[in-house]
Image: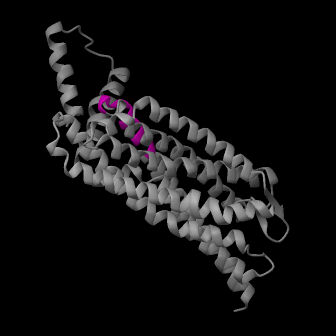
Amino acid sequence: MSSSSISDGILKFATQYSIYTGCITFSFGVIGNALNLLVFTQLKLFRTNRCAFYITIESISNFIYQFFSISLTILTSIYGDDATGRFLIWCKFRFILGQTCSLINFYMICFSAVDQFFSTNHRFNVRQMCTSKLGRYFAFIFICFAIIHSIVVGSFYNIQPTLGCVISNYVAVQYSTYFLYPIFGGLLPVVIASSFSILAYHNVRHIVRRQLPIVRRKLDKQITAMVLMRVIVFVCLLLPYITYRIYTINFPISQSMPMVYAVGRLLQSILLSINNINYMINFYLFIISSPRFRRQVKFVLVKKCWQRWKHWCCPINNRVEPDNNIEPRNSQIESVENM
C-alpha cells in the first residue's frame, strides 16, 4: 500500500471515530447535565448551598458545550473535518465559545473545592469569610472575565493555507504557550482544585467533633466526597489534552505532509474525545460516588417530576384535602430531601 492510501485510511478512521464518540458524548452529556440541573434546582437542600450553585453553573456551561461539540461532529461528518479551516468567522467563534466553556468548567470546579474548604473549616471566622453573596459575585466576575479573555485571544486566530485555523500573532502564540494552556488553563486549576479538595476532605473527617445539625454534617460529607471525586477525574482527563495543545500551537502540522497530518488528526480526535468526557461526567460520578445523591435523584424524578407530569396530563380526583394533612406531607417531603 502507498503512503497516500494509508494516510487517507487514517484520516477516514479519525473522522469516523470523531463522529461516533461525539454522538455518544453528546447523548450522555445532555442527559447527565439536564438531570444535574433538575436535582440541584428542585431540591430545597441544594438551593441554599453555595457549592451546589457552582455545580449548577458548571452544568449549564457543560450543557452549552455539548451542543457546541455536536456541531463539530456534524461538520466533521459533512466536510471530513471541523470546517475551521474553511470559514474565518467559525475559526474564531469555535475557539471563543470552546475556551469560554472550558474556563468556566475548570474554575467552577475550583470554586466548589475552595468553597467546601471554607464551609467545612473548624474555625468559625474562616467559615464566615465565604458567603453566598460573595460567591455569586466572584462567579459572575469570573464568567465575564472568561468571555472577554476568550474574545481577545480568539481574535488572533486566522486561516493559513497549509496549516488551517491557527494563531497568527507571535505574542498570542507565546501567551498561549507559556501562560494560557500550561498555567491558566492547566496547572493553576489543577493545583487549586486538588489542594482545596484534599483540605476539605481532611476537614470533613473531623467534622463529627463540631456541634452541627446532622443534616448539615451529612450534606457537607456528601458534597465534599462528590467534589473530591470530580477533581480526581478532572485532573486525569485534562492533562493529556493540555499537553497536546501546547505542542500543536508551537509545532502546527502542515497538510503538505499527508502521513504526519493524518496521524496528528487521529491523535487530536482521541485526546479531544477524552477531554470532552470532562463536560458530561459530573452526574454519573455523583451517582457512583454518593448513595445519598442516588436517593435524591430518585426522589426528584419519581416524587416531583413524575407526580407533576401525571397531575398535568391526568387531572383527575382534584379534591381539596383537609388542612391537617398538609403539614405531614410537607414534613415527609423535607425528610426525604434531607436523606
Report the residue at 26% width, 31% height from top. 303
Residue 181 at x, y percent in the picture? 61, 62
Q: 311 left or right of 155?
A: left
Please check the rendered image and state whether residue 274 is part of the magenta-colored stretch, yes or no: no
The vertical placement of 221 against 339, above or below, is below
The vertical placement of 316 against 153, above or below, is above
Give the quadrant of the N terminus: bottom right
Q: In which image quadrant can residue 182 be found?
A: bottom right
Residue furthest toward the right?
A: 161
Magenta-drawn segment: 33-45
Please check the rendered image and state whether residue 40 is part of the magenta-colored stretch, yes or no: yes
- Who is closer to the viewer here, 154 or 31? 154
Dominant secondary structure of the magenta stretch? Answer: helix
Let me know if residue 15 appears in the view: no
Residue 283 at x, y percent in the picture? 38, 49
- Who is closer to the viewer here, 8 or 101? 101
Q: In which image quadrant can residue 254 be found?
A: bottom right
Residue furthest toward the bottom?
A: 1
Report the residue at 67% width, 47% height from top. 149
- Who is closer to the viewer here, 336 or 307? 336
- Who is closer to the viewer here, 257 or 178? 178
Q: 125 left or right of 25?
A: left
Report the residue at 38% width, 40% height from top. 51
Report the residue at 23% width, 7% height from top. 320
Q: 158 left or right of 114?
A: right
Residue 299 at x, y percent in the picture? 26, 35
